Amino acid sequence: MPAYSTNMKLKFPILALSLEIITIILYGVFVVYDDVNGHSTGHNTKNQTHEENPVSLYPMFQDVHVMIFIGFGFLMTFLKRYSFSSVGINLLLAAFGLQWGLLLQNIWHLEDGKIRVSIYRMINADFSTATVLISFGAVLGKTSPVQLLVMTLLEITMFCINEHIVNEFLNASDIGASMTIHAFGAYFGLAVARMLYRPGLRNGHDNEGSVYHSDMFAMIGTVYLWMFWPSFNSAIAEPGAPQLTAIINTYFSLAACALAAYATSSLVEKKGKLDMVHIQNATLAGGVAVGTCADMSIGPFGAMLIGVIAGIISTLGFKFLSPILASHLGIQDTCGVHNLHGMPGILGGLAGIVAAALGKKAGTSPAFQAAALGSSLGFALIGGAITGFILKLPFLGQPPDQNCFDDSLYWEVPEEEEAGESLTHTDHSKNKAEV
Amino acid sequence: MPAYSTNMKLKFPILALSLEIITIILYGVFVVYDDVNGHSTGHNTKNQTHEENPVSLYPMFQDVHVMIFIGFGFLMTFLKRYSFSSVGINLLLAAFGLQWGLLLQNIWHLEDGKIRVSIYRMINADFSTATVLISFGAVLGKTSPVQLLVMTLLEITMFCINEHIVNEFLNASDIGASMTIHAFGAYFGLAVARMLYRPGLRNGHDNEGSVYHSDMFAMIGTVYLWMFWPSFNSAIAEPGAPQLTAIINTYFSLAACALAAYATSSLVEKKGKLDMVHIQNATLAGGVAVGTCADMSIGPFGAMLIGVIAGIISTLGFKFLSPILASHLGIQDTCGVHNLHGMPGILGGLAGIVAAALGKKAGTSPAFQAAALGSSLGFALIGGAITGFILKLPFLGQPPDQNCFDDSLYWEVPEEEEAGESLTHTDHSKNKAEV
Amino acid sequence: MPAYSTNMKLKFPILALSLEIITIILYGVFVVYDDVNGHSTGHNTKNQTHEENPVSLYPMFQDVHVMIFIGFGFLMTFLKRYSFSSVGINLLLAAFGLQWGLLLQNIWHLEDGKIRVSIYRMINADFSTATVLISFGAVLGKTSPVQLLVMTLLEITMFCINEHIVNEFLNASDIGASMTIHAFGAYFGLAVARMLYRPGLRNGHDNEGSVYHSDMFAMIGTVYLWMFWPSFNSAIAEPGAPQLTAIINTYFSLAACALAAYATSSLVEKKGKLDMVHIQNATLAGGVAVGTCADMSIGPFGAMLIGVIAGIISTLGFKFLSPILASHLGIQDTCGVHNLHGMPGILGGLAGIVAAALGKKAGTSPAFQAAALGSSLGFALIGGAITGFILKLPFLGQPPDQNCFDDSLYWEVPEEEEAGESLTHTDHSKNKAEV
């Protein structure tokens, strides 16, 4: 691949600014503040009307916000030389994605031709970015910022279509979005990764690993996702008992999942040691898997069972399934999103079908729950394949194999770290010296 | 000590899964959701009934949650080669502890044979884990995950018995738990450390120190504990004035404590330099010491006095007392929990006795406050000694002296960091490459 | 400069303890708890009376608290050898500053000779410390803890005078404090930096740069500031629609600003690479610039425009203006606060004037808004110059040029990091071993 193709000099700033300008124009036309009478807060209108304080959901919103920007951002910093991109590009994609997502999620039900912004809709906008950040994990280190901005634009668009079908037509229940966000984001990303398959990385890459401190930064992401997941699964639940139920189920599912993940990791590693990859990811699978039925009366007992199963499946996936996907199916999944979001997302969808069949939530039907799962997987795989095909366009600056998992292709990186010493004066520090 | 004894291959996963399965079964029998009529939220029933929104305590809960998992977890990452264990085992112990704690804290007052989970009770469950995490700090680097899971099981059990006695029989006031959590956790841990005394570490250990970045990770824990301590001390206080009082007292006690800790650290170090050990820990002593009387009308003035005294005592303890405890009493206190939780906890208990004598809170008596302090210390020392004796059982995999303070005994650790260079391909990165 | 002058042995602890003791005495005389009837919460009395729960603002307070201690503290840790001081001295200054600020902000309107502490006033106390932390960024690495404590005392005093003039006499609107906090703090710090100009650092300093991990720690600060800025700009807004508006405007301004900052950084760097200095700082300029009119009906559209302009101006400032200020005006601005707080703060003030002229908020006048901006800049420049003159007093322990940007002058620093290896036993680890 010719060097110039990875040069972002003009194509990146032009794309980013163009997207922002188009977005601002659309906001000028369509977006206004919520009138705070509460009768315009999207799907769960009826509860919101009982809500007098328009910012009562704000603490929940901030928990979700932290999961999106700190949780996802730092979880991906485990790579030894790709931490700038992990947290930095995560911020870029989410910042654009939430603007784009708010538009497309609400374009379906304008009121007087306007979209009325509320905290409730800001939470949903943040949610829409989660799908992109999950897919980002699958292609982490192997895509350019230009490719990723294009992916954000396309993925959120398709996510909003599927979400609309699941919520409005199928009227399925997926409060924690196991299907519409986690399974969708994972399989979308895996389809993109398959299209961008790199035979040259079949035997791994020197940079595709962690160092001690990069694993510690990743744990910041893990722990925040683990702590705030109850907010993710309950933020837009019906106020009152359903919201409390969603919090409690997620709290216990994650607690049980953690023990299962630690136990399984020790069981499959030589000499019973724990593997940071498992701990950083599989401990969270319980939050994904309990998502669909988080607000259903499955009981703390049921939530813990789901968590244990998710923790075991996820850890086994990292140990045994991911290598097979890479070697036999040409799916190189950098962060193992299939194990954290893919399989646990499907597990969550299946649990939702069972819960619906057992009448754990009024108004849900196993058939429509199954249709919602199918729709999410279908849109993900087809949408991801189409997106991956588009991302292969050469002028999008895909990095050559030898430059994968390396910040220095897109960032001014202080030399010390690479040279292994910390005394010389670098370009970067010069920049800072001027500043 | 034979090598095999440290091998966790089977004993750790079997223990962790067994504990989780037993817990799930007990939850299936005893635990249900709160019925959201509010008349089942534990000790402060009367206020909770005035509380219409069942998740109104949720933001407070999340602050406490962050203190438990980020605060305690990262505070202990200061050791140069033990950060994986500090934050990772902290997560494991707290995840199990909160499940176990919720059961034992509420087994005393079942309703129709059930425990009804509410946010209020989730906060208390998180609290119960704090005792274990404090004790963990005393034995950090010298115990196996198997030993620590056993300690969690035993310590939370004894904590719940003492807490029940203090709250129900003595009817003592300890809103911020200076006595029942901090003093209890510290002296329990010190008793365990005494039983596990290692003469071989009398002259320290090469790994028992920090590196620059590990001290920075520890500061993440320190700052989060410092910021959210007002939530810890006020989360379960009576809504209204008492809760506001607890927030204000803790806020000012910590602010005053910080200045005292910085001043004292500079005063006792050569050339007036600051010591990270003091800053990471002693700045928090004010939160511990003001705990018991946080919701009493001691005035911001009184809270600041308590904070200053705590900051000075704690710093002096690190500098002068800890070395003596290690050399003369055989108490090797890795994190110096005696200085952060032990002495400030007793100070808090004494302050509570004085405040009760001065009538700063209706319904409190100096005698019962003193009895509560005595009970907490007694249960801690006896319970810790018994637990320490049990933890010496050889099959629990206690690490040999030379492997102390070293993650590599229990974790797959990337080689780069130790080798001091970051270019070679390691087992760990191979694992990630496969993934 | 003689070595002894940098020795903090006695002067630092004596100053810190003296300030704390004086503060405690003043609190004993003046400060009591809010009576929780809500009719004593400062500027927005009328709304607070509608507020029944005295801790309803607490989640907002904690967001601001995190911005002050984690956000500002870690944002400044980018320097390779000055991270202890950045986060540690940030904690010290803010801890003293909030106690001092609460006194001086409320001394103007005592009730029965008392200051009644409420969450609302705790938020404002935290705000007052932000000015000092902004100025700290301008002189980072070139001042002693003693100098900085003196600066905190003087700056907060002058901030409170200006704030009183702006709020009470000019009755100007500055809900997000673009003028009274950001512009004030930036130009105050720049005036101090000018007075402390160091010709010896004209060509930069070997330590004045980052390493890979120090840039990652700084990103923790950046992301938290970015996420919680909506809380900063809305915390003390009128409950209801104005507060919701402030949240929404800040949310969108920051999102738009992020894209503009990334695009501009890539545009001005060679080969279109991103510069961490720009990403860590310029992505936040939108929060500063939208501050003054955050609660005005400028529309999401208007907020995004402000954000884009702020992101571009800030990035260009880092790249082109800061070097000129350093080389031609003798203003050495370590963190580039002029680009993050100075220019965006003025932009915010100007936007407020325009918004007032367009009648975007009832009761605001362009003239008084302009007067508020002028007053803030005037007090900042004059106050900063006076403070800088005082800080030059030799006994305040200003570090010599060669010891700038180096923690080891004020902290016990583990040797490993500097030596580049992590095996030897250091003083610091010995200290820990004793502990």
Image (spheres, coloured by chain):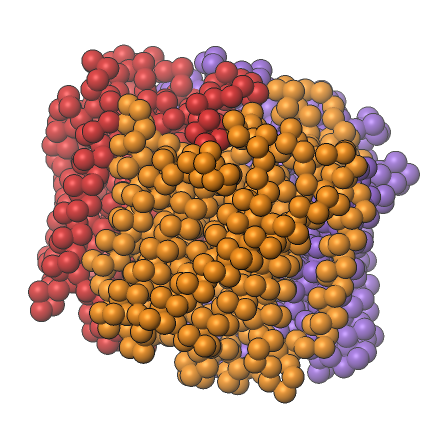
Chain colours: A orange, B red, C purple
Where residue A55 sits: x, y (%)?
51, 72
Tell me the quarter of the picture where residue B359 sits: bottom left
Position of residue B166 in the picture relative to residue C287 (left or right): left
Where residue B68 sits: x, y (%)?
35, 46
- Measured along the vertical axis of the image, is residue B415 above or below residue B351? above
Position of residue B208 in the picture relative to residue A215 (left or right): left
Where residue A136 sits: x, y (%)?
56, 48
Q: Could you say which is closer to the camera, residue A173 or residue C153?
A: A173
* Name of the residue lying farthest toward the front: A328
Residue C27 visible = no
Residue A267 visible = yes
Residue at image position (22%, 32%) is B12
Position of residue B390 in the picture relative to residue B287 (left or right): left
> On the rendered image, what quadrant is the C terminus of chain B found in?
top left
Residue at image position (77%, 33%) is A3
Position of residue C224 in the picture relative to residue B371 (left or right): right
Residue at image position (38%, 74%) is A238
Where residue A112 sits: x, y (%)?
63, 87
Q: Could you say which is closer to the camera, residue B68 or residue C235?
A: B68
- Count of numbered tags: 0
Tell me the quarter of the picture where residue B251 sits: bottom left
- Measured along the vertical axis of the image, is residue C198 above or below residue C368? above
> On the rendered image, what quadrant is the N terminus of chain B found in?
top left
* Name of the residue lying farthest toward the left: B113
Residue at image position (40%, 19%) is B207
